[in-house]
Image (spheres, rainbow, N blue to C red):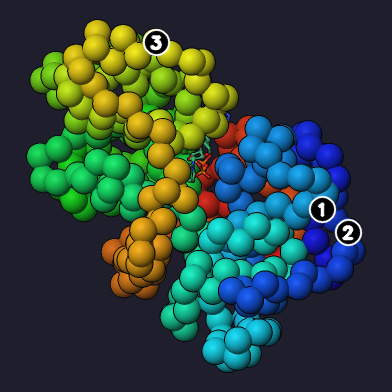
Amino acid sequence: MRAIYITHTGGPDVLTHTDINAPTPKDNEVVVQVDIAGVNFIDVYFREGIYHSPTPFVPGFEGTGRVIYDPQGEIAEGTVVAWCDAFGSYAEQVCVPRDRMVAVPESLEPHVAASMLLQGITAHYLTHGVYDLSEGDSCLITAGAGGVGLLATQMAASAGATVYSVVSSEEKVALAYEAGATEVFFYSDNLAEDVRRRNGGVGVDVVYDGVGKATFNESLEAVRPRGTVCLFGAASGPVDPIDPQVLNTHGSIFLTRPSIGAWTAREGEFAMRAQAVTRAVTSSELNVRVGAVYPLADAAAAHRDLEARVTTGSVVLQVS
Ligand code: NDP
């Protein structure tokens, strides 16, 4: 089968389009013919070796396609599914854990189905888990026009929260407002001060920071006393180690570094979040913006663009 193969970690050029053997499923997995694979920032961390996988490997975690073989004979051949958490998704075939996929309603556009779960479930656990937003709450979201950012903005706004969004271009400003942001800012060293000025000086209840190194200090400054800083990614690089005393000096704040794995680990939790996302997307309450589609062979270009901050919303690879 055709796949993107990584024999050593590094820059986008290590993403090689080649022929490899199709994978063999374990008992709890089904084999899927991949139509479209989602591209996520976590794929960049694995490609670079910041998150470790033994080489060689096929990157990618999510997508949509048709079931071609279920060793347990439960899922009919041809069933259209979407999944996340199936390592090796940048390929014509992937083995998907049976408890990490959902059936795709016919009305769902395939590019949307391919990229709704990883970012959608993340946005869901951030806004309905790490800090349960409700009417009158306020939050700050960095990379507000990215894949997770646009979905988290919509979920936060529909929970009734005031949403401050941070982005890097005029196009992204417009997208963040369209998603329901109350106020949109450009990154700056005065970000926290600007946000505080808009919300009465108190600071926000929660900061959702997926940018990391470049924004972390402003995130600490922007949160209210006893509020939550949720550092959920490192698009600009990992944050330096901190002295816990910093949490005291900022007013007894909470700092968490969550993962989608931990926030879908409880019995039924993956299904609950995946179904909430699928329902919201199907009913058009949640809009998944597919910002760019690349052929599988151009995975390197997709990574380059994601890292150069030129993409908006989600990014997908057309596999077959
Ligand atoms: P995005 O579509 O949000 O792309 C990353 C965005 O980060 C860019 O578009 C850019 O937006 C912003 N950014 C800021 N600084 C940089 C930089 N130096 N280099 C590159 N990008 C930068 O990606 P995803 O939606 O896939 O992921 C967003 C974040 O969420 C990532 O950090 C990812 O690791 C994290 N994540 C965490 C999960 C978890 O469970 N912990 C699960 C899924 C994602 P702008 O130009 O506006 O700054």
**Picture disc at residue 18:** 2
**Picture disc at residue 209:** none
In the rendered view, tell whether residue 221 sits above or below residue 230: above
Q: Residue 103 in the image: x percent, y percent?
A: 47, 79
Counting other residues with Cα less than 10 Å from the Cα at mark 3, is it few (<14), some (14-19), or many (20 or more)?
Answer: few
Residue at x 89% of width, y 64% of height? 19
Instruction: Check contact, mark 1 vs mark 2: CB within 8 A.
Output: yes
Residue at x 64% of width, y 45% of height? 43
Q: Is residue 268 left or right of residue 205?
A: right
Q: Secondary structure at mark 2?
A: strand
Disc 2 or disc 3, which is closer to the eye?
3
Counting other residues with Cα less than 10 Å from the Cα at mark 1, is it few (<14), some (14-19), or many (20 or more)?
Answer: many
Amino acid under label 3? Asp
In the rendered view, tell whether residue 303 sits above or below residue 37: above
Tally of marks: 3
Q: Which residue is mark 3?
A: 243
Disc 3 or disc 1, which is closer to the eye?
3
Q: Report the front residue among 79 and 195.
A: 79
Q: Secondary structure at mark 3?
A: loop
Q: Tell which circle, 1 or 2, labels the residue nearer the N-terminal end.
A: 1
Counting other residues with Cα less than 10 Å from the Cα at mark 2, is it few (<14), some (14-19), or many (20 or more)?
Answer: few
Q: Report the front residue among 128 and 106.
A: 128
Q: Tell which circle, 2 or 3, labels the residue nearer the N-terminal end.
A: 2
Q: Quadrant of the C terminus?
A: bottom right
